[in-house]
Amino acid sequence: MTDQNESIANVVYKKEKVWFITGSSRGFGRIWTEAALERGDKVAATARKLESIADLKEKYGENVLILQMDVTQPGQVKSAVEAAYNHFGRLDVVFNNAGYSLVGTIEEASANDIRALYETNVLGPVSVIQAALPLLRKQGRGHILGTSSGLGHVAYPVIGYYASSKWAFEAIYESLAAEVKQFGIDVTIIEPGAYATEFGSPDSLKFAKSLDEYKDLKDRFIGSIRNLKQGDPKATPEAIFKVVDTEQPPLRLFLGSYNLPEIREVYAQRLKTWEEWEAVSNSAQG
């Protein structure tokens, strides 16, 4: 009978997942939260302002738990993760999605600008991970996802600090994957390209103090961003579902068709440079 019960439990787990998603009020977070609920999963949806996700409760009832949580407040994070776990009895997918971008050159951004960015984009996800891991280990399974970017591999002018936060995010997740595999926990980094989300809204985009010396550079860069062909964010949920439903999920997944060609070119150039300077590098071995 025990084996039969365990088999039934596994079937339920595969059909219905319990998600914990940060940044559920807008953008990808909102789209993925609603998509998971629409397919019959349960979601603990979090946001800094509870009123921004209150309508989810009205629409999806008992399948959603709405929680007020600021990822920069570790105490709030721990309480929210534990509340979600206690409410649903398990957590299958823990999804770090909250974040924002800082626009400004390396010279322009202040220490406070950079610190605030890292509090949200790097330390916030770490707080979620550290709060969730004891519970996922107790379960003996789980899947930790995180929204990075194609900019987790390449940096551009004007958004260098944002890109750096994603490089840090990717390194943390890559280390995490190797550390928690022994506990039956999977880790996946989601790397979207350019999408038509609210990521350019005041809540998702902060500007450093401007210097006149960089005005032309910034105007050109922002103009090039506006001309990018953007993907449809509503086309992304099925890709996310394929990742969380497979038995062997990838460590990284690009969203969109433009990232991979660009990254191929970037890494080809990096390899070319390293190889050209290989003799100099080897001479430094001693």
Image (tube, helix red, strand yellow):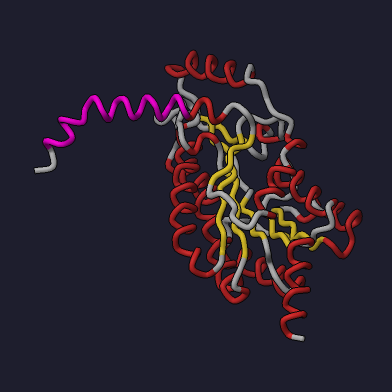
Numbered marks: total: 0
Residue at image coords 77%, 67%: 11
Q: Who is closer to the viewer here, 246 or 270?
A: 246
Q: Is residue 240 left or right of residue 182?
A: right
Residue at image coords 56%, 47%: 189
Q: Is residue 101 above or below residue 52?
A: above
Q: Is residue 38 left or right of residue 163?
A: right
Q: Who is closer to the viewer here, 283 or 151?
A: 283
The rendered magenta stretch, by its main secondary structure, is classed as helix
Quadrant assignment for the N terminus: bottom right
Range covered by the magenta-colored residues? 264-283
Q: Who is closer to the viewer here, 55 or 135?
A: 135
Farthest residue, direction bottom: 1
Q: Is residue 157 magenta?
A: no
Q: Is residue 178 above or below residue 156?
A: below
Residue at image coords 59%, 44%: 190
The picture places residue 8, in percent across and down from the top left corner, at 78, 73
The picture places residue 273, in percent across and down from the top left corner, at 29, 26
The picture places residue 160, in percent across and down from the top left corner, at 45, 32
Residue at image coords 87%, 65%: 62
Q: Is residue 228 above or below residue 97?
A: above
The picture places residue 65, in percent across and down from the top left corner, at 79, 63
Farthest residue, direction left: 286
Q: Is residue 278 magenta?
A: yes
Quadrant assignment for the C terminus: top left
